Structure formats: C-alpha cells, structure tokens
Image (cartoon, grey):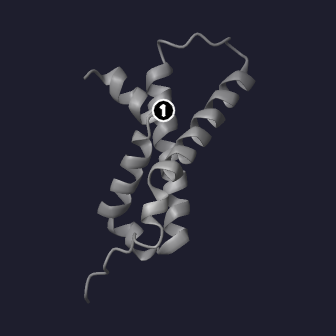
Amino acid sequence: MELTDILTWLISGGGAAVVAYFLIAKIKFFWQFEGDTKRYIAFGLSGLVAVAAWLLLSFGTETLPAGNWWVWAQKLVLVFTTSFSLSQLIQAPQLRGTMRVPKPEA
C-alpha cells in the first residue's frame, strides 16, 4: 500500500473516522467528554483529518486555477462534510452512548 492509497482511504473511505475515534480513545484530554459532545468532537476531528490528508494528496497532483480561492473552498468543504458524514454512517450508530472511557481514579 502506497502513501497515496492511505491518503485516499483517509479522505473518502471512512479512514478519517477510524483515526478520529482512535485518537478520542487514546488521548486523555478527550476522556472528560461524554455522549453527544464526544460525537461532535469526532465530527470535527474526522473532518480535519480528511482535510489534512486531502491537502497532502492534492499538493503536486491537483491542478486548480491559481488565484481562484472559491474552487479550493468548495473542495475543502466537500472533503470535510463527506468525512464526517461517513463517520456517522460507519461508526456512530454503534458507538452512540458506548464511547464512555473510564476516568482514572484519583
């Protein structure tokens, strides 16, 4: 598997959602949030991972008109919304209410 395959999976194959939920489970900062708040954080994180992957993939391969920021903005919004939509279709129904990570004892 090449880097372009991994980036493509992150952008359009639900990979960003997998990475987002993995980060939420592993980073202690996110443990303080519960329920829907954690789902909304997963929305944003999966979108950011997908946008970052798209930016890495697109530099050098995409030929968008220089100076036309609107085309770039449309693509970024499309990548972001596709990513968090996929995260909900793939993972959220089974994780809703079950993403409670036990808080460490004091």
The quarter of the picture where the N terminus appears is top left
Q: Position of residue 62 (x, y in %)?
A: 54, 14
At 48% from the left and 38% from the top, the residue drawn is 50
Q: Residues within 10 Å of mark 1 (few under 14, many from 20)?
A: some
Which amino acid type corresponds to the residue marked 1 in the rendered image? Ser
Q: Does 69 sit left or right of 9 as displayed?
A: right
Asked if residue 83 is positioned above or below residue 41 in the image, the reply reads above
Asked if residue 35 is positioned above or below residue 63 in the image, the reply reads below
The quarter of the picture where the C terminus appears is bottom left
At 51% from the left and 63% from the top, the residue drawn is 39
At 48% from the left and 32% from the top, the residue drawn is 12
At 29% from the left and 61% from the top, the residue drawn is 26
* Closer-to-camera residue (25/63): 25
Quadrant of the rendered structure where residue 72 is? top right
Asked if residue 37 is positioned above or below residue 8 in the image, the reply reads below
Residue with the mark numbered 1: 12
Q: Does 94 sit left or right of 51 as displayed?
A: left
